[in-house]
Image (cartoon, grey):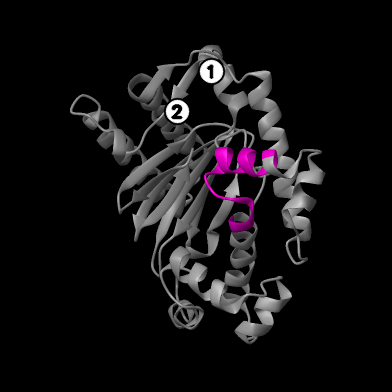
Amino acid sequence: METVTHEQIDHIMDNGFNISFVTMEHNSPYHWHREMEILYILNGNATVDIDKEKHTLHPMELIAIDSSKVHNVIYDMNHTMGICIHISKNFMRRLLPEIELLRIDCSMDILTAENHPAYMQLCEHLTALTILYVSQSTTYALRSQALVLQILAVLIESFSTPMTGTLSVKDLKNLDRLDNIFQYVEQHYKEPVTLQDAADRLMLNKEYFCRFFKQNTGVSFLVYINQVRIHHIYHDLVHTEDATMDIMERHGFVNQKLFYRMFREIYGCTPRQLRTLAKDNPYM
């Protein structure tokens, strides 16, 4: 799931959702999509940033990322594995028209004595869905849809709250602006992109653009573009034998000291250690 922007979940199935395994290879910088995302960690750990809040997931823990939430995901080294579900908003709307008036928020951080049993029920459903996904029996489509519907029902019954309103015109405009800049970075991250370049893309002055980007992602634009570069460098470190310096230059990272510091902060290891961990890793 190579995404750094408004993620188009093109592989949503006819039944309205998609299920996939995710590993350390599926780290994703900040992006957003119109589908609700449910991430369930099986092995290892993952860090998810949503609305500038950091969530750490351990084995047998889950998080629900509501539609149109800007977020990123980092999977820890080296045996992290999870199951990820994207559920179409149109699919949910057909089943429950008032879904637009509900906000779904589910993670370990907000558990209470009251909703803890519901959380454990979600974990049971997700474990069963994982087993079903692996087996791919002839009735997989039927049984997986039944489980996804049960998961949705529990989320709505125990982890939803009424919204004060749907996304405003301003909210949608901000998402479109972010989408625009995310796409621009993906197309030009190998080049020496400046703050002024990005601000000009949105026809904003540089000072306002800096505030806008930080308010909506939690990081500065310059940090974000370097995160995107590191994301691509990570992929090449795992899948090629090219020298680290050559890969850095190929992806537009010119400050070696900054690169090594940011790489360790994001992934908790050096590029050399990553290659050692990734070698013959059955999870890759």
Residue 45: quarter of image: bottom left
Disc 1 crowd rating (10 Å Cα; few below 14, some 14-19, many 20+) is few
Question: Label 1: which residue?
Answer: 95
Question: In x, y percent, where is residue 86?
Answer: 54, 39
Q: Position of residue 159 (x, y in %)?
A: 36, 25
Q: Residue at x 47, y 61 (%)?
A: 23
Going 72% across and 36% down the picture, which residue do you hit? 177
Distance from the alpha carbon under mark 1 to that under mark 2: 10 Å
- Closer to the camera in the image, 198 or 83: 198
User: Label 2 near label 1: C-beta < 8 Å?
Assistant: yes
**Which residue corresponds to the image point at 45% horizontal and 33% vertical from the top-left?**
148
Reading the image, the residue beneath label 2 is 149
> Judging from the image, what secondary structure is the residue with disc 2 in?
helix
Q: Residue 53: image x %, image y %?
A: 42, 42
Is residue 153 magenta-colored? no
Q: Earlier in the sequence, mark 1 or mark 2?
A: 1
Q: Is residue 2 above or below residue 230?
A: above
When the figure is inspected, residue 97 is found, relative to residue 50, above or below; the finding is above
In the picture, measured across the screen, residue 159 lies left or right of residue 48, that is left
Q: Which secondary structure lies at badge 1?
A: helix
Question: Residue lying furthest left in this view?
Answer: 113
Asked whether the viewer can see residue 107, the reply is yes
Range shown magenta: 208-223
User: Residue flagged by tag 2: what amino acid is it?
Assistant: Leu
Q: Is residue 8 visible?
A: no
Measured along the vertical axis of the image, is residue 254 above or below residue 109? below
Would you say residue 215 sits in the magenta stretch?
Answer: yes
Residue 81: image tag:
none
Q: Amino acid at mark 1?
A: Leu
